[in-house]
Image (tube, rainbow, N blue to C red):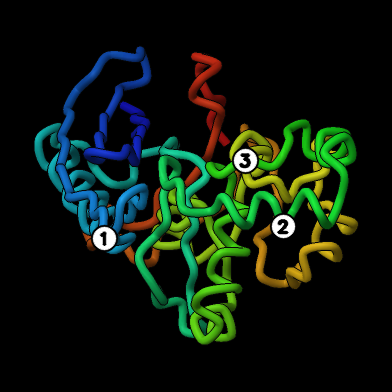
């Protein structure tokens, strides 16, 4: 029998579910992790807590179900949006992730509105600058932690960090990327104009895929029990059944 695994990297916990090919839940597991608020209005999490929760729950659902690793035909990932994950040249986390509900970036939002009119932001990114979007978080690190920014070689969202852990691929998909305020939404690609205005190097960002596209063909960092299932992402909010690769 073939199986699919869904992983949701939430704010309070990671939830992992294994389904059979008929859509029946065969096993599920969750693991919680803390949220840090070092100052009023700040909200951070350690991406390595997400990593540990994903690997633990993957191991648990495969063991519970008795599924053979070769019968796992796809892994889908959903998760909290907008969080800033910064990795160095060796793929290690530089600082805690500034997550979606963090409100420290008011000055950076004003800076963005000085750089480009509100109407132009909406025309390109489909949204005005807001404290929740990832772009303002990147500017905050540039302004307040320049050494951390200089060390940064990869900028990812929370679920895209998990994609990297599972596959070694640096990528995102259009639904998540649209919430970073760096995407040219009508053209479904990173906006050269926005990146130039904010002085963000395009090489820091992963490749943009459609939400249903396969973005990894192996899982080198999974425990041996989960050897090499293909990884597929899809827009979980649509509630559609993903097609196997």
Query: Could you tell me if residue 230 is visible in this image?
Result: no
* Image quarter in which the C terminus is found: top right
N-term mark: 2 or 3? 2
Query: Could you tell me if residue 46 is visible in this image?
Result: yes
| Secondary-structure class at tag 2 | helix
**Front residue of 192 and 169:** 192
Q: Label 2 vs label 1: CA separation?
A: 24 Å
Q: Label 3 vs label 1: CA separation?
A: 21 Å
Label 2, residues with CA under 10 Å away: few <14, some 14-19, many ≥20: some
122 vs 237, left or right, is right
**Front residue of 64 and 112:** 112
Q: Picture coordinates of residue 166 (x, y %)? A: 40, 58
Residue lying at 65% horizontally and 60% vertically, measured from the top left = 206
Q: Label 2 vs label 3: CA separation?
A: 11 Å
Tag 2 and tag 3, C-beta contact below 8 Å: no
Q: Picture coordinates of residue 116 (x, y %)? A: 86, 51
**Front residue of 107 and 202:** 107
The mark found on residue 130 in the picture is 3
| Secondary-structure class at tag 1 | loop
Residue lying at 83% horizontally and 57% vertically, measured from the top left = 115
Judging by the rendered image, the residue that carries numbered circle 2 is 111
Residue 202 occupies which quadrant of the picture?
bottom right
The mark found on residue 211 in the picture is none
Residue lying at 50% horizontally and 78% vertically, measured from the top left = 145
N-term mark: 3 or 1? 1
Label 1, residues with CA under 10 Å away: few <14, some 14-19, many ≥20: few
193 vs 212, left or right, is right
Residue 108 occupies which quadrant of the picture?
bottom right
């Amino acid at each position: 029998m073939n199986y699919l695994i869904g992983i949701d990297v939430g704010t309070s916990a990671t939830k992992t579910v294994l389904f059979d090919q008929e859509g029946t839940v065969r096993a599920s597991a969750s693991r919680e992790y803390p949220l840090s608020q070092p100052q009023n209005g700040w909200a951070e999490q350690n991406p390595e807590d997400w990593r540990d929760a994903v690997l633990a729950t993957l191991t648990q659902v495969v063991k519970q179900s008795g599924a053979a690793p070769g019968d796992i035909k796809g892994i889908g990932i959903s998760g909290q949006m907008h969080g800033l994950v910064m990795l160095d040249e060796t793929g290690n986390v530089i600082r805690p992730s500034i997550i979606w509900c963090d409100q420290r970036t008011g000055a950076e939002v004003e800076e963005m509105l000085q750089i480009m009119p509100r109407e132009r932001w909406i025309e390109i990114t489909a949204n005005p600058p807001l404290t929740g979007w990832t772009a303002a978080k990147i500017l905050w690190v540039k302004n307040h932690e320049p050494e951390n920014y200089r060390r940064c070689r990869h900028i990812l969202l929370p679920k895209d960090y998990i994609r990297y852990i599972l596959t070694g691929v640096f990528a995102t998909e259009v639904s998540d990327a649209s919430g970073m305020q760096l995407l040219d939404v009508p053209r479904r690609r990173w906006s050269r104009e926005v990146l130039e205005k904010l002085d963000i190097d395009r090489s820091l960002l992963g490749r943009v895929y459609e939400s249903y596209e396969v973005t990894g063909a192996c899982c080198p960092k999974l425990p041996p029990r989960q050897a090499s299932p293909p990884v597929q992402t899809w827009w979980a909010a649509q509630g559609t059944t993903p097609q196997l690769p």
